[in-house]
Amino acid sequence: MADDIVTANEMLLDRQIYDRDGVEVGKVDDIEVTIPGDGGTPVLTALLCGPTALGPRLGGRLGMWWTAIGRRLRPNDELYPVRIPAELVTRFDRHEVRLRAPAGELPTERLREWTREHIVRRIPGSH
């Protein structure tokens, strides 16, 4: 069972995620797996994205720092890490993950929009 989870991790981690129109929406930083109560085969339930998913993978001080920045930069009502349900995945391969939803409907866009509005917009010449 643990081997199945390790294999899924190796197959999905760091893959670029694209929406249904081919727009980049993030990278797979971690995965969420549910293990059935009856001890059956683990099931991939979500792709996790963003600094709060990547930080624990990095580990050490860098990982703690990265996670803390992600928490500070997220919108107040945003859960973290960003979770993309597995039902939205249409296919994945060695290089990418494709989704059935447009970028605007995905939770990855909320953090990007918030960062543009509250940080990037204030940088001189960023318009």
Image (cartoon, rainbow, N blue to C red):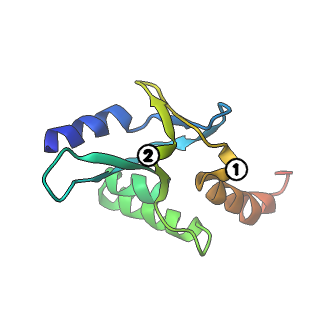
| Secondary structure under the numbered disc 2 in the rendered image | helix
Residue at x 65% of width, y 30% of height: 22
Residue at x 21% of width, y 55% of height: 36
Residue 100 placement (x, y as % from top left) = 58, 38
What is the spatial separation of the Cα atoms under label 1 and label 2, in whole angstroms? 17 Å
Disc 1 or 2, which lies upstream in sequence? 2
Q: In this view, does 99 lie above or below 96?
A: below
Q: In this view, does 40 lie above or below 60?
A: above
Which of the labelled discs sits on residue 60, or is there none?
A: none
Residue 73 placement (x, y as % from top left) = 59, 66
Three-letter code for the amino acid on which mark 1 is drawn: Gly
Residue at x 42% of width, y 46% of height: 29
**In screen coordinates, is 100 left or right of 37?**
right
| Secondary structure under the numbered disc 1 in the rendered image | helix
**In screen coordinates, is 111 left or right of 7?**
right
Residue at x 46% of width, y 60% of height: 81
Which of the labelled discs sits on residue 86, or is there none?
A: 2
Q: Name the residue under label 1.
A: 104
